[in-house]
Amino acid sequence: MKKLLALVAAAVMAAAAVPAQAQSYPSRAIKLVIPFPAGGATDIVGRTIAQKLSVALGQNVIVENRPGAGGTIGADQVAKAAPDGYTLLMATSSTHSIGPLINPKIPYDPFKDFAPLAHVASAPSVLVVGGSAPVKTAGELIDLLKKNPGKYNFGSSGIGTYPHLAAEMFKWRAGNLFVVHIPYRGTGLVIPDLVTGQITFLMDSIVSAQTHIKDGRVRPLAVSGAVRSKSLPDVPTFKEIGVTGMEISNWFGMFAPAGTPAEIVQRINREVNAIVRQPDVVERFEKVGAEPAGGTAEQFGALYRAESENWKAVIKRANIKLD
Amino acid sequence: MELLDNLALGFGTALSLENVFYCFVGVLFGTLIGVLPGIGPLATIAMLLPITYKMSDPTTALIMLAGIYYGAQYGGSTTAILVNLPGETSSVVTTLDGYQMARNGRPGPALAIAAIGSFFAGTVATIMIAAAAPPMSEIAFKFGPAEYFSLMVMGLIAAVVLAHGSVVKALGMVVFGLLLGMIGTDVNSGVARFSFDIPELTDGLNFTAVAMGIFGFGEIISNLEQRENREVFTKKVGRLLPSMAEFKASIAPIIRGTALGSFLGVLPGGGAVLSSFTSYAIEKKLSKTPERFGKGAIEGVAGPEAANNAGAQASFIPMLTLGIPTNAVMALMVAGMMIHNIQPGPQVMTSNPTLFWGLIASMWIGNAMLVVLNLPLIGIWIKLLTVPYRILYPAILLFCCVGVYSVNNNVFDVFITIPFAILGYVFRKFSCEPAPLLLGLVLGQLMEEYLRRAMTISRGDWSIFVTRPLSLTLLLIAAVLLVIVFLPAIAKKRDEAFAEEAD
């Protein structure tokens, strides 16, 4: 009986402690898991946010890079962490929209296991060809590919990666082009073959294409996204050249484990929205080709659900399977 | 003039306070660990690689790694001369005459001539890299998947041909490395192979963990077997500067060794080891008094030491310009670059000119530091040689584990070192050289990728490898190399050439 009483008392106290805990949040250091290696775009975005969040919340936000298996190792770690607001994830399209569609063995559910916190940034892509390619515009490229089905190649950073799916989407939206996919281990490796003409086009992130665009090695033809990119103001959007449905961006967003108290979600969402408007943050994001985003946690949740549907259609159409 | 502009850019980068500092740290730590008997450059770099992962600037990281490399290379010579224990294979020949000089009461001049010879060779090799790199990169842009594949076939065959001892064993190690390289996600289909549903294995084996297990831990385990009876010439170093006669006798071997190393170092599988052995053989042939060799001839120290340093540095050329590691140390450097999101290859020179030229300039600075660091501090290194292994090795093991863990913040990688440490020990017992394995591990993955990419581009037509002239040439060279190894007459000669090192 005494034991039972003690249990009840403990339960009551624990229940009472929950709101108190949320109010005093954060009372200790927060861990932000970045599921990609140090130095990449996700890492730079994540570290920028972590540094600013430390100031805003008055507690250290410690960055932990947990790379591996296309970001799923780090994401899985957060999915299985306690939903107390002390373990957060900096995710991208790869971990939450594309990865789970491509890999049936993924150990987490991108929708059920996470509570969306905030949409941090977006990174549109750019369609590039080699600097000495015979085509000068996207229209000419589409014509060339239409007239020579199966003759040309495109490169990507691997099966089911963002550049691969973006290119598949381009093939579809530009009129069901037949171009052969050649996977690489990163878009940087595609560049030499793009220059020598063995690869005809590549959908690259603006930042990684930027250095090669500057020295004339590759030529940008069109950017995805709703409006032109600030980094490439002379390059038209797909919409402008008459290819619709290509308003796609790779997103960076934050998640907590599912079941995280609503107050904590609100609090972090509010802080992140303030952070992504700070001029020095905007400037740092621009360097990695990312445009600051923002909005409510619900909007972010809706965005990545909608995006998943979008990619699902592309994957089905292009018949992409891991086999 | 472009050469001067490039070097100016390089020195501008390499001479920043931060880079000079890390270059110094690299050279210092490299020497420190390299001085430990039995632990060579490969093990040293494998152990210290993880600490560069957290550096913000890849240039600084590479400068430090390069510093570790020639620091360890040089440290190996110190133990070769003073303790008769080569720190690494390329200083095996230094033990022949260097140790005899030490026994004859001339350890100082032996150490000094090794340092001076290395510095001269390093200077020449630096200039050569600066001059050779731009045209090499131009050629590299003509390389498609077919050419890369053929180049790697040639590289692997050359590695087998130039490996010591049994060809069969070397071949076996390469194949084993190739198989290990299969673990991970297949680029063409996106399927995880041999990962046994372990998510950590879907990216392949952690290269650092494998290298550290096989080279670092494996070497330590086998060193522990040896009894600690070292005869260290602690008090007898005395006079450092060589006499005028010794100087004169060394000049020609140093120049010849430098030329030899600069040439052989560029070859796949060549590098420091082959250069030093060849130099020793040449000096002995050219000498009017070959009977002095093995009894303390200064030429036998000067030539090989210059050659191994030039060879070590020249092996950076194919790595930096083609992105192809020609030996296991360069394979580690490639891993170091990839961690920083720099894909080695012809594009590095144009997209990262400060990194490229900064690294080259730092090589000269590092070599200069070695001379300054080593001659006056020789006493300290000797002290280190007297620290008992039972204290030294547990500390090294601990730091290694911390290093491996910190790469991915993953305990799994630390566990990965265990089976490879055991393997590394077993390989030593069976005298199987583990370097071809590492090369197979790195090149295997790349080779498969390039093969399949070339085949996809040719839409399944194998003739792509022989209709492209560059690719055909490379394959023909590979075929010639293969014939050479298996021709009985030549195979016998080869055994003789390598027999000299056996004692």
Image (cartoon, rainbow, N blue to C red):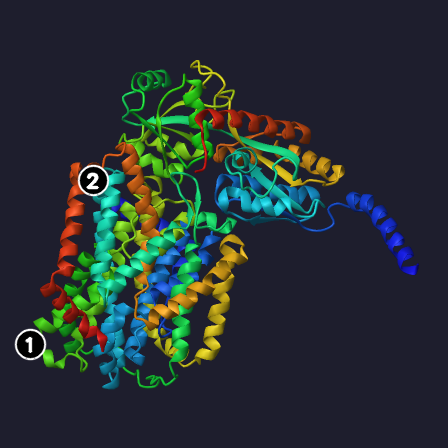
Q: State which chain disc 2 sits on.
A: B
Q: Earlier in the sequence, mark 1 or mark 2?
A: 1
On the image, numbered disc 2 is attached to which residue? B465
- Residue B222 pos. (x, y %): 38, 74
Q: Is residue B203 above or below residue A212?
A: below
| Amino acid bearing label 1 | Lys
Q: Is residue A151 left or right of residue B218?
A: left
Quarter that holds the C terminus of chain B: bottom left
Q: Is residue B426 above or below residue B379?
A: above
Q: Please name the residue shown 37% across and 27% down the image.
A: A128
Give the image quarter of residue B252.
bottom left
Taking the image as drawn, is residue A102 in sight? yes
Q: Nearer the viewer, residue B488 or B249?
A: B488
Foreground mark, 1 or 2, reads: 2
- Residue B267 pos. (x, y %): 21, 55
On the image, numbered disc 1 is attached to which residue? B288
Q: Is residue A205 above or below residue B101?
A: above
Q: State which chain disc 1 sits on.
A: B
Q: Is residue B235 left or right of residue A5?
A: left
Farthest right residue in view: A1
| Disc 2, SS | helix
